[in-house]
Image (tube, rainbow, N blue to C red):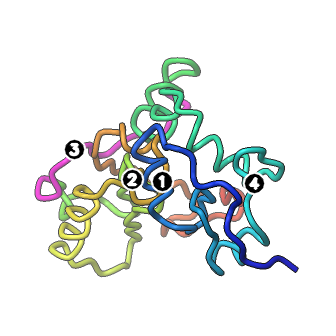
Amino acid sequence: MHHWRPLEKPCPMPESSYQRNACEVGGAGCGLSEGYGVGTIITWGGRPHLFRPRRFSEKIQWRKLFDLDPIYAVFSDKVATREYVAQRVGSDAVVPMLWLGNDPAALPLDTLRAPYIIKCSHGSGWNVVVRDNDPMNYDTTRVQLGRWLASDFGYQKIEPGYSAVPHLRQTRPILSSSPAGRRSPNLEIR
């Protein structure tokens, strides 16, 4: 059974704003604070070991906080990753793009043919999926896209790779083998 107890030493002096943010979070999964809250212990199953990581999840967290290689910004950026893959493998290996831009008002929602997905290049999970028969409130969608545009996912989630990514929206067709744009079990990745 793991019990809450503070670290023997205080948090080391952070070198980046992300490490400072991790220290300020106070145990919200990062492990750099002087104490760990109940949420951290439940999430990690105990106190995370970030200075000598053992588990895969601890190694991932260590890498996000301390291994600030600029290539991670490329791999965090959906648009830059497309270009990276197209240069090395060929443009036919990437899904075609229907629209790219940073102004939600310029997104041609009324002329795009469903099914498609709108993704933010600088975050994870910031997607709008539009299927054939789905009703869509264009104004609400544009407001939500504007909120995501103004947000820094990297700072919020202590993932510095995302902060260097330009804030863009990309729209692409949904990968599906069914005519209505439903997910195909063959294309679903878990």
Q: How far apart are labels 1 and 2 at the CA level? A: 5 Å
Q: Nearer the viewer, mark 3 or mark 4?
A: 4
Image quarter where the N terminus lies is bottom right
Q: Counting residues from the N terminus, which is met first, the one under dot 3 or under dot 1?
A: 3
Q: Counting residues from the N terminus, which is met first, the one under dot 2 or under dot 4?
A: 4
Q: Is residue 96 magenta?
A: yes
Residue 18 is marked as none
Q: How far apart are labels 3 and 2 at the CA level? A: 22 Å
**Total number of numbered discs in the rendering:** 4
Rendered view: 94 above or below 62: above
The residue type indicated by label 4 comes to: His
Rendered view: 16 above or below 5: above
Residue 49 is marked as 4
The residue type indicated by label 1 comes to: Ile
Q: Nearer the viewer, residue 83 or 31?
A: 31
Q: How far apart are labels 3 and 4 at the CA level? A: 41 Å
Q: Counting residues from the N terminus, which is met first, the one under dot 3 or under dot 4?
A: 4
Dot 2 alpha-carbon crowd within 10 angstroms: few under 14, some 14 to 19, many 20 or more: some
Q: Nearer the viewer, mark 1 or mark 4?
A: 4
Residue 190 % position (x, y): 71, 60
Q: What residue sits right under mark 1 in the picture?
A: 158
